[in-house]
Image (cartoon, helix red, strand yellow):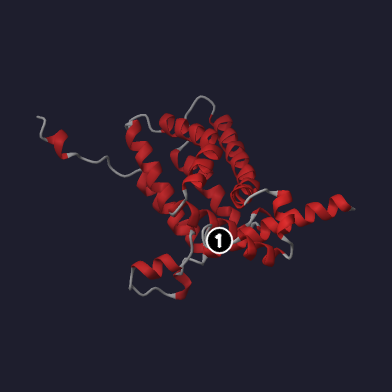
C-alpha cells in the first residue's frame, strides 16, 4: 500500500508541475507553487526528483518516451509497407508531426496541457532543457532525417534540414496556445477559426507543413551571379 501511495504522490507531483510549467514557464514556477498544487511537502518532491531541473526533465520524459516510440513504430510500419520504395514525404510529415498533434486528444498522454507545454518550451527553452530535448529526440530525428533524404533525392540535403527546422518552428508556435496569434496580429478571425479549435488547427497546420516541404527551391543571389 505504501508503494501505491508513493506512485500516486509521484504522479500528482508530475501532473501539477506539468500544468504549472505550461501556465507560467520553468522560471516562473517555484517549488512552492508545485508543492501547493500537488498537495505535498517539499521533502516529497526532493525524495522523488531531487531538484526542480530533474522534475522538469521527468515531466517531459514520461510523455516523450511514448511519443518517440510511437513515431518510430509508425515510421517502421510505413517503411515496411513501402518495401524498396521510399515513403511518401507527406506520410513522413504526418508520422512525425501528426503523431504529436494527435496527443492533444489523449488525456492519458498529457492532452492539450502537454502539447502547449512543449510548444512553449520549444519557442523559449533554457539551455539545460534544450540539451535535454536534443538528447531525447536524437535517435528519432536521425531516422526521420534519413527517411526525408530518401523520399526527396532531388532536394539538397541542406534544404531538407532547413525546411524541417522551419516545420518544427511553425508547429511549436502553433501549439503554444492562442495568445501568440492575438499578440502578433490585429486581424479579426471568427471564433470557429481560433487556434484552440484543434479540430481545425491540426489539418490547417499539416497542410501548411506539407506545402512548405514541397515548395520550390530557393534561388540565391550569389549563385545567380556566379555565371
- Residue 179 lies, in percent from the top left, at 44, 68
Label 1 crowding class (10 Å Cα cut-off): few <14, some 14-19, many 20+?
Answer: many
- Tag 1's secondary structure? helix
Residue 205 at x, y percent in the picture: 44, 55
Q: Position of residue 193 (x, y in %)?
A: 45, 69
Q: Farthest residue toward the top? A: 84
Q: Quadrant of residue 38?
A: bottom right
For label 1, the residue is 22
Whether residue 112 is visible, yes or no, is no
Pick the front one: 227 or 168:
168
Name the quarter where the C terminus is drawn: top left
**Residue 68 relative to residue 48: left or right:** left
Of residue 168 and residue 52, the one placed in the foreground of this image is 52
Q: On screen, 111 above or below 69?
A: below
Q: In the visual, does 16 lie left or right of 8?
A: left
What's the residue at 54%, 36% (across, down)? 140
Q: Residue at x 53, y 31 (%)?
A: 82
Q: From the viewer's perspective, is 209 left or right of 60?
A: left
Residue 78 locus on image (x, y percent)? 56, 35
Amino acid at each position: 500500500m505504501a508503494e501505491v501511495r508513493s506512485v500516486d504522490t509521484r504522479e500528482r507531483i508530475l501532473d501539477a508541475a506539468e500544468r504549472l510549467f505550461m501556465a507560467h514557464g520553468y522560471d516562473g514556477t517555484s517549488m512552492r507553487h508545485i508543492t501547493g498544487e500537488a498537495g505535498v511537502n517539499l521533502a516529497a518532491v526532493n525524495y522523488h526528483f531531487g531538484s526542480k531541473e530533474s522534475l522538469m526533465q521527468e515531466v517531459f520524459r514520461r510523455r516523450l518516451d511514448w511519443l518517440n516510440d510511437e513515431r518510430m513504430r509508425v515510421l517502421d510500419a510505413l517503411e515496411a509497407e513501402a518495401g524498396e520504395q521510399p515513403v511518401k514525404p507527406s506520410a513522413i510529415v504526418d508520422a512525425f508531426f501528426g503523431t504529436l498533434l494527435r496527443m492533444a486528444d489523449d488525456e492519458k498522454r498529457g492532452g492539450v496541457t502537454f502539447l502547449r507545454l512543449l510548444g512553449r518550451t520549444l519557442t523559449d527553452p533554457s539551455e539545460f532543457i534544450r540539451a535535454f530535448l536534443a538528447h531525447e529526440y536524437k535517435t528519432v530525428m536521425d531516422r526521420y532525417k534519413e527517411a526525408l533524404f530518401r523520399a526527396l533525392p532531388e532536394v539538397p540535403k541542406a534544404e531538407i534540414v532547413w525546411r524541417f527546422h522551419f516545420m518544427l518552428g511553425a508547429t511549436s508556435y502553433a501549439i503554444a496556445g492562442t495568445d501568440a496569434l492575438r499578440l502578433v496580429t490585429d486581424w479579426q478571425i471568427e471564433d470557429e477559426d481560433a487556434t484552440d479549435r484543434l479540430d481545425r488547427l491540426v489539418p490547417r497546420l499539416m497542410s501548411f507543413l506539407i506545402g512548405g516541404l514541397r515548395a520550390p527551391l530557393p534561388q540565391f543571389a550569389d549563385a545567380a551571379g556566379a555565371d
